Amino acid sequence: MTAGAAVDAVLAGLDGIRSDVEDLYRDLHAHPELGLREHRTAGKAAEALRGFGYEVTTGIGGTGVTGVLRRGTGPTVMLRADMDALPVREATGLPYASAVTATDGEGAERPVMHACGHDVHVACMVGFARLMAAATEAWRGTLVVLFQPSEENGDGARAMVDDGLARKVPRPDVVLAQHVLPYPAGYVGTRPGAFLSAADNLRVTLYGRGGHGSAPQAAVDPVVMAAMCVVRLQTVVSRETAATTPVVVTVGSIQAGTGPNIIPDHAVLQLNVRTYDPAVRERVLAAVERIVRAEAQASGAPAEPKIEHLMSFPPTVNDADVTATVADTFAGHFGADAHTADLQTASEDMSEIPAAFGVPYTYWGIGGTDPQLYAAAEREGTVQEEVPHNHSPAFAPVLQPTLDTGVRALTVAALAWLAAPARGTGRLRN
């Protein structure tokens, strides 16, 4: 069977499951869970996979789930979906909007929302897994579907790897993943090479000497020190980085003091660094440390600043050959809706999974915005203002064609390998 015929055979069942995929999406959206606490979501995924006939393993890295479906000799393809939500209060007004609250890692009660589309990812993966199980005559090989926890915290993929993922599922020949983005629903976008940035979160504590606001000469003011650091850190991008090299440095939090006439004894900055090249990353992080230490010294700080690395995401760098294969299949199936995606400054930890197996991967985007809304905003030049982006409390992908596109993209990409097992991982042969 050719790849095209295999795609047609598998997707012939899409009309029959569409309402179930939509219902699952609404249910997941209304019941979001924070990272490493996705017990209900993981249970839904595992229950569905068992019902489809997959070999299911649960609890990997805490709440991770895998399903394996074997269909004779051929390649092994792994597809990944993330499950966790965000501590965001939903403002979509949808009838299935989240009203959930949960305790975060620091013990605070937070509103919780699927503000990044992981509910889309899970629903599409379950729909895809169902179609593949119902049409096993259309493909050969081994299919591995993986539901990953805690992507937003950057530790879910590593948790699964550290918990022995590589021993619990067959070694894949390729790993595939997708993410819903604020593009028009129906859009699919691939990109070879760098796609998502590496990200580093840091906390900097600057130490001063407290005192009365009426006698600043007797104190060392960490608020001024922090302000100078914020200004100076912007020069890492504007004056130390070539204009052709994408780098972002953001100071997202400043905390200091308790009153208007009290000079505090310390100030805390939290910042985020995004880069695409490992050498650039090391240089930027070194520049941040150099600037912070120099400003402290220039201010006469009584102690060296404390610089803590809180979290790191690896870059997502798509394999050129794997991406070319997927791009070819998308072009053939989606036509004008298949695009070359823009470089994204968001970050992901998915690449930890293929790295654990030493195999290539590709990661693509699908659109989730109402096409008419997007087109109107594009005409007016107001896409950034009018189109809700990931992590916004107004982020709400339209059900269709978003869900159909996600199911179809997973199917088309997987069958580029599984429909033609003899060809290995090169370009698609029809």
Image: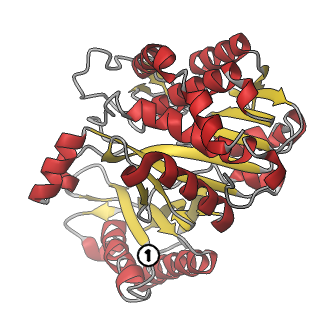
Picture coordinates of residue 251, whole percent (x, y)? 37, 63
The amino acid sitting under disc 1 is Pro
**Residue drawn at point x = 50 percent, y = 16 percent:** 17
**Residue drawn at point x = 73 percent, y = 61 percent:** 426
Which quadrant of the structure image shows residue 243? bottom left
Question: Which residue corresponds to mark 1?
Answer: 246
Picture coordinates of residue 393, whole percent (x, y)? 29, 35
Picture coordinates of residue 46, whole percent (x, y)? 68, 17
**Residue drawn at point x = 61 percent, y = 28 percent:** 10
* Along the viewing direction, whichever of 396 and 173 lies nearer the viewer: 173
Q: Residue furthest left?
A: 380
* Along the viewing direction, whichever of 252 and 58 lies nearer the viewer: 58
Quadrant (top left/top right/bottom left/bottom right) for the N terminus: top right
Rendered view: 136 above or below 176: above
Which quadrant of the structure image shows residue 395? top left
* Along the viewing direction, whichever of 408 and 7 lies nearer the viewer: 7
234 displayed left or right of 353: left
* Along the viewing direction, whichever of 423 and 287 lies nearer the viewer: 423
372 displayed left or right of 341: left
Rendered view: 150 above or below 154: above
Rendered view: 133 above or below 184: above
